[in-house]
């Protein structure tokens, strides 16, 4: 494992990665909910 300047696995970066993943999942969930609601309206 080469340690680069951009990726340092300390507690701060791990928290950022989890938050980024959670935001991505939230966006996907909202898009799916919007698509389902649009289908129900039709």
Image (spheres, helix red, strand yellow):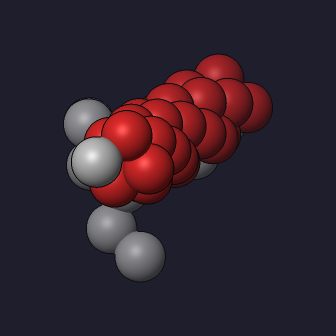
Q: Quadrant of residue 34?
A: top left
Give coordinates of residue 11: x percent, y percent: 73, 32
Image quarter of residue 18: top right
Who is closer to the viewer here, 16 or 10?
16
Toward the right, the furthest residue is 11
Please state the horizontal and vertical placement of residue 16, each as a whole percent of the image: 55, 28
Figure check: 11 above or below 3: above
> At x 33% / y 68%, what residue is drawn?
2
Residue sitting at x 26%, y 36%: 5
Who is closer to the viewer here, 33 or 20? 33
40 sits to left or right of 10:
left
Does residue 24 appear in this view?
no
**3 with respect to 42 (left or right):** right
Task: Quadrant for the N terminus, please.
Answer: bottom left
Q: Position of residue 15 (x, y in %)?
A: 67, 30
Q: Is 19 or 36 nearer to us in this picture? A: 36
Q: Nearer the viewer, residue 38 or 15?
A: 38
- Position above or below: 28 against 2: above
Position in image of residue 33 (x %, y %):
49, 44
**Furthest residue to the bottom?**
1
The reply to whether residue 5 is in sight is yes
Residue at the (37%, 40%) spot, across then down: 41
């Amino acid at each position: 494992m080469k340690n680069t300047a951009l990726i340092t696995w300390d507690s701060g970066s791990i928290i950022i990665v989890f938050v980024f993943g959670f935001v991505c999942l939230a966006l996907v969930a909202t898009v799916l909910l919007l698509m389902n609601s649009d289908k129900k309206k039709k």
